[in-house]
């Protein structure tokens, strides 16, 4: 049934991703911006569309959370900062859900069952109380493993392994995430378990979710992260990398069954292409590769992302922007489906993943997901 009035949308966090989402909302007549919340005092009071260089819309950016909680809206596109302490975000999102607003977010909740019942139950209770739906999305996590890899696997009747790899040139990315990742720091300062846990939070969810959808009982999830120093000084948009400090982050997250890796995610983020593993052919700044081994065929496929219009890039030096733009698009594109979904936590659609038994159509949440034990090396 066609909807006759626009979806009333709130953007929570007009940072890099949130600002890109605002621009997409400004283009879509079926979406109506009704609120925008920022953490930075410098943004408060500005017109939300004027802030991103579009025609004013009459909605002023606010830092008043209570005003947003009581606002009449269909969906909140939540792009708040991702921090090691999740308690503040957890509280904000449960409040939004209880207030009757659906939530789409790029910061968490891609497969929250991996973190246990104490983590999931407050979210489910909030959805039930508000009659609302929560969905975590993005390019990776959110699309690459959950949809792109899963769709590739649907070409097989049975799957023995899936290996995915993301390769990104971050040399022209001026955002705060560059320093947070650890670029420009001494490798010995970055080997802490805490830092690796932050990186692993997302990719463990991806693997646990993929294993669940495939019907795999994973024994454990393993993380191994390497920090590669630069032999020379690099001047990049977000950081100056001195000789001997980190210019490449190369991590692998594995899902293990019976001592064998059956699922894996490799993340390769670099500031200098000369330091990239020479076995990797760099065909674009943002590369997503999938290798599926199965029957009756194996599948090799890749997605290369390119920015199609420089007008959409915030910052002239940010040429590594296609993935950022695509992340914002996922926020906006999911809004209608999340509003239409029944209350609860919504997974990315997995229509044609391999079924172990063709007599039944798989229901991904008919079997309660369980956390998989993790190892961080």
Image (spheres, helix red, strand yellow):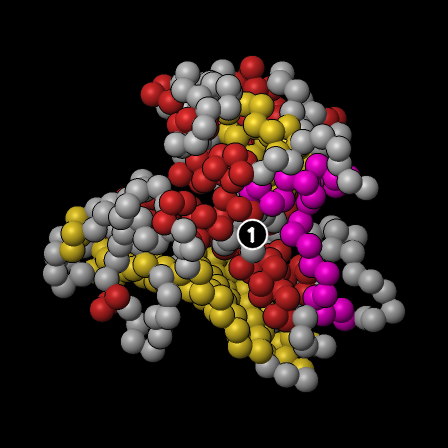
Q: Position of residue 171 (x, y in %)?
A: 26, 54
Q: Residue at x 55, y 23 (%)?
A: 35
Residue 113 seen anywhere in this rendered image of the structure: yes
- Residue 23 appears left or right of 231: right
Q: Position of residue 242 (x, y in %)?
A: 13, 53
354 falls in the magenta region = yes
* Count of number-bearing discs: 1
Name the one closer to the observer, 92 or 307. Answer: 307
Q: Residue at x 55, y 68 (%)?
A: 263
Residue reaching furthest to the bottom: 296
Residue reaching furthest to the right: 359
Q: Quadrant of residue 341?
A: top right
Instruction: State whether residue 186 is above or below residue 155.
Output: above
Q: Residue at x 23, y 62 (%)?
A: 272
342 falls in the magenta region = yes
What residue sits right under mark 1 in the picture? Answer: 142
Q: Position of residue 323 (x, y in %)?
A: 44, 53
Instruction: State whether residue 328 is above or below residue 259.
Output: above
Residue count near mark 1 (Cα–Cα under 10 Å), binned few <14, some 14–19, many ≥20: many
Q: Position of residue 268 (x, y in %)?
A: 36, 62
Q: Residue at x 42, y 55 (%)?
A: 308
Residue 116 seen anywhere in this rendered image of the structure: no
Quadrant containing the N terminus in the rendered view: top right
Residues shaded magenta: 331-356
Circle 1: element type = loop
Q: Quadrant of residue 91?
A: top right
- Residue 228 appears left or right of 240: right
Name the one closer to the observer, 320 or 306. Answer: 306
- Residue 6 appears left or right of 86: right
């Amino acid at each position: 049934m066609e909807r006759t009035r626009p979806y009333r949308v709130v953007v929570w966090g007009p940072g890099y991703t949130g600002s890109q989402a605002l621009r997409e909302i400004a283009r879509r007549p079926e979406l109506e911006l009704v609120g925008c919340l920022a953490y930075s005092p410098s943004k408060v009071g500005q017109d939300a569309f004027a802030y991103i260089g579009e025609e004013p819309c009459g909605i002023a950016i606010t830092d008043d959370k209570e005003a947003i909680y009581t606002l009449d809206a269909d969906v909140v596109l939540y792009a708040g900062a991702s921090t090691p302490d999740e308690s503040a975000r957890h509280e904000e999102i449960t409040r939004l859900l209880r207030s009757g607003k659906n939530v789409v977010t790029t910061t968490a909740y891609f497969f929250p069952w991996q973190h246990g019942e104490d983590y999931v139950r407050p979210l489910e209770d909030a959805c039930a109380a508000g009659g609302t739906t929560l969905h975590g999305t993005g390019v990776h996590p959110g699309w690459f493993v959950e949809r792109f890899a899963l769709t590739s696997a649907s070409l097989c009747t049975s799957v023995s392994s899936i290996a995915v790899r993301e390769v990104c040139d971050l040399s022209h990315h001026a955002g705060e995430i560059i320093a947070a990742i650890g670029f420009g720091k001494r490798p010995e300062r970055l080997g802490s378990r805490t830092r690796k846990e932050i990186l692993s939070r997302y990719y463990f969810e991806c693997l646990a979710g993929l294993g669940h959808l495939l019907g795999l009982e994973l024994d454990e999830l393993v993380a191994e992260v390497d920090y590669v120093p630069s032999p020379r000084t690099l001047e990049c948009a977000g950081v100056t990398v001195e000789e001997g400090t980190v210019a490449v982050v190369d991590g692998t997250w594995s899902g293990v069954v019976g001592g064998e890796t059956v699922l894996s995610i490799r993340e390769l983020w670099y500031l200098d292409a000369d330091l990239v593993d020479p076995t990797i052919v760099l065909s674009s700044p943002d590369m997503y590769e999938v290798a599926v081994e199965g029957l009756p065929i194996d599948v090799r496929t890749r997605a290369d992302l390119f920015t199609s219009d420089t007008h959409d890039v915030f910052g002239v030096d940010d040429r590594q922007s296609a993935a950022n733009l695509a992340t914002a698009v996922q926020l906006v594109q999911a809004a209608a489906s999340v509003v239409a979904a029944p209350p609860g936590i919504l997974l990315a659609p997995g229509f044609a993943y391999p079924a172990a038994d063709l007599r039944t159509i798989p229901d991904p949440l008919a079997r309660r997901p369980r956390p998989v034990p993790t190892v961080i090396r």
